[in-house]
Image: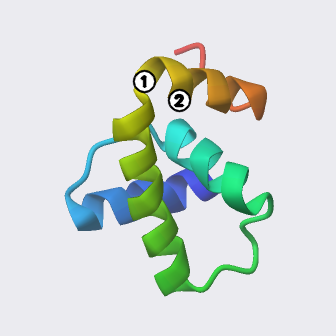
Amino acid sequence: MYQQMIITVLQGLDLEADPRHVEAWMRLERGNLDGLSRGRFRLEVELSVACIQQAGLVESEELAESFGLLRSAS
């Protein structure tokens, strides 16, 4: 559910990132994403992309996996 919202925000900001990585960084800070306003959700996506850029893809993938956000088998 959140990943589709993240994809929409990423497209609107013209940013590229794996939505699983973005969600993982958001959850690291927030845990629960349900109560975020639309504006706050957008800001959290932006901050998460910055975290991904700083930490790198390997650490971001490990973080996503730690939250059970696994790659689809497609």
Three-letter residue code for mark 2: Ser
- Helix, strand or loop at mark 1: helix
Viewed as shown, does residue 28 lie left or right of 71?
right
- Helix, strand or loop at mark 2: helix
Residue beneath the point at 40% across and 27% down: 56
**Viewer can see residue 70:** no
60 shown above or below 16: above
Q: How is the image coloured?
A: rainbow
Residue 63 location, x and y as percent?
A: 65, 30
Name the image quarter holding the N terminus: bottom right
Is 68 or 43 nearer to us in this picture?
Answer: 43
Is 2 or 39 nearer to us in this picture?
Answer: 39
**Viewer can see residue 18:** yes
Proximity of marks 1 and 2: CB atoms separated by less than 8 Å: yes
User: Which residue is disc 2 drawn over?
Assistant: 60
The number of discs equals 2
User: Which residue is disc 1 drawn over?
Assistant: 57
Viewed as shown, does residue 68 lie left or right of 5?
right
Residue 44 location, x and y as percent?
A: 51, 66
Instruction: Name the residue at the left extreme.
Output: 14
Residue 9 quadrant: bottom left
Three-letter residue code for mark 1: Leu
